[in-house]
Image: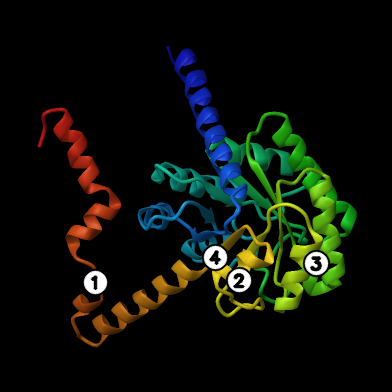
Amino acid sequence: MWGLILPLFALVQAAAAGMAATQLRSILARPQLTVMPCCYDGLTARLVEDAGFDLTFMTGFGVSAVHGLPDTGLISVEEMVRSASNIVSSLKRIPCIGDGDTGYGNEVNVQRTVQRYAQVGLAGIMLEDQVAPKRCGHTKGKQVVDRDEACRRIKAAVQARDAGADIVILARTDARALLGLDEAIERCRLFRELGADWTFLEAPESIEEMREYCSRVSGPKLANMLEGGKTPILPPKDLEAMGYTVAAYPLTLLSSATRAYQDALRLLKNGDDPEKLLVPFKEVQRVVGFDEYYRTLEGFGKE
């Protein structure tokens, strides 16, 4: 019996992943910019969807943070896959893109990472050209591989996609900080020629640089709106006018949650009541799924 059920389950997973990728491609084809808050676990993914957004992204910075680690390549591919599986399972309506870092090895590793991300239902994967172990793009210590190696990574990812891993390839470069804007733009252009669905030039340092990237690179483009980072924070309407397709907010939820945690803990430490910081218990129950759980039981005649 299990010999029949397990292949059927794999087919269902593959079909769901394909629908998510199709949904993401439709979003990228829109003329208007899409705002994309980033998540790092099932709860934050559900909150993004509950707030009415059309798209989210599993941030490696956030996943590392909830493991108690910095975003410095310490999280393994299988830890990321487990986090992705939890996130995708918590979503009902919107697609999620996964942070694939450097692909976790050589070109064969890149292809396996693409396949694993597609298998758990992620709509897209972001792959970058940093030297492993990677760093958060707005922190010190990062390095990038040479142009040929960067292109081989994207070529491997595209091959895996075209061989049946139905997933959208987001090609990222961190070359701006180390090799200059022209090299970063040229890498994005090459990534597109190799078949990447869209590009992400990390950490442009001025509005002029952002405009130049948008004017010189074809296809959909991602703007990274990291509060306190190197890139100017602009309103969505300005990003759309420049030519950006999606605006990511990678740390907005993590940063605001950290502030809320610190405030609540400070009140507790001082013997004060943190109730003024809290949402009602009934709302917490709704967000994590109690209401849906009880409705399901009621459908079976149980209370």
Label 1, residues with CA under 10 Å away: few <14, some 14-19, many ≥20: few
Q: How far from the left and from the top, in percent, is residue 89?
A: 42, 42
31 or 122: nearer the viewer: 31
Mark 3–mark 1 Cα distance, whole angstroms, equals 43 Å
Mark 1–mark 2 Cα distance, whole angstroms, equals 35 Å
Q: Give the answer, above or below, for where 205 lies relative to 85.
A: below
Q: How far from the left and from the top, in percent, is residue 256?
A: 42, 73
- The residue at the point 72 percent across, 71 percent down is 210
Q: Residue 168's image quarter?
A: top right
Task: Tell me the SS state at disc 2.
Answer: helix
Report which residue position mark 1 lands on.
278
- The residue at the point 19 percent across, 76 percent down is 275
Q: Residue furthest bottom?
A: 270
Label 3, residues with CA under 10 Å away: few <14, some 14-19, many ≥20: many
Which of the numbered marks, if any, corresponds to residue 250? 4
Name the front one of labels 1 and 2: 2
Count the numbered circles shown: 4
Name the front one of labels 2 and 3: 2
